[in-house]
Image: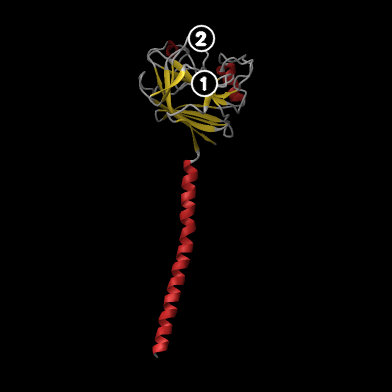
Amino acid sequence: MKKLLILTIALSTLVACKKKEEKVEETEPQTTTETSEATEKKEEWTVLFDGSNADQWRGYGMETMPAEWTIEEGTLAFTPGPEGGKNIITKDKYTSFVLSLEWKISEAGNSGIFWGVFEAPKFKEPYMTGPEIQVLDNLRHPDAKIAGKLHQAGALYDMVEPSEDTTKPAGEWNLCVITIDQKANKGTVVLNGKEVTTFPLHGKDWEDMVNNSKFKDWDGFGEYNTGHIGLQDHSDKVWYRNIKIKRL
């Protein structure tokens, strides 16, 4: 009887341990998957500027960064020089993406954010090929008062007006999120949390917009789906920070 009792206890202990092992085996893969998914989601974004260096950038038509672009208190700052034309572009090229950054413009200042920039000797400036999302002091710069709203901050420059002015005053930071989705044929600009501009990227609607703009007869303008991201030297002081991009 005693031996039978000992055997029963041993068998019960063995079964309990086996069930515990099976439970661990069932739960461990789920934990690993959740961790992997969280890591993958975090790694979707590529940091283009985090305040410490400008290693992801170079001057347009240059191998290095122009001296006019410096790091000031964690921002990528442009101070105009005597020559002009010191635009910068990303070292990598992008097709469909979400670009998130903050910009701050000086009083009466002007700058811009390009995409689809094609670099070639015949194109002296990024704006010759790359469409531009306007960066502007809407209150003081004269561009804000001509051509309707086509030259105001958040506009697809000279082609699509922003639906409303959501900018903060010169000297304050604006959060700008630009989505370029070539497959969906849709571009959007979200400025300070509000979607202000939507536009097609190719096809008849795009061609109509170009034909009704200053770019009508520009060879190469907006023709490159894949290209560099650019930041503009418009001879005014401007700052950028927290720049990151996610490919779609």
Secondary structure category for the residue under label 2: loop
Quadrant in which the N terminus appears: bottom left
> On the rendered structure, is 218 left or right of 100?
right
Q: Quadrant of residue 76?
A: top left
The mark found on residue 65 in the picture is 1
Percent across and percent down for residue 24 are 45, 63
> On the rendered structure, is 107 left or right of 35?
left
- For the point 56% across and 32% down, the residue is 96
- Count all numbered tags in the image, as a single digit: 2
Which residue is under mark 2? Answer: 83
Specify the amino acid type for callout 2: Glu
Q: Which residue ends up furthest to the bottom in the rendered image?
A: 1
- For the point 63% across and 19% down, the residue is 120
Specify the amino acid type for callout 1: Met
| Mark 2 → mark 1, Cα distance in angstroms | 15 Å
Secondary structure category for the residue under label 1: loop
Within 10 Å of disc 2 (Cα), the crowding (few <14, some 14-19, many 20+) is: few
Percent across and percent down for residue 46 are 50, 35
- Along the viewing direction, whichever of 220 and 104 lies nearer the viewer: 104
Coloring scheme of the render?
A: secondary structure
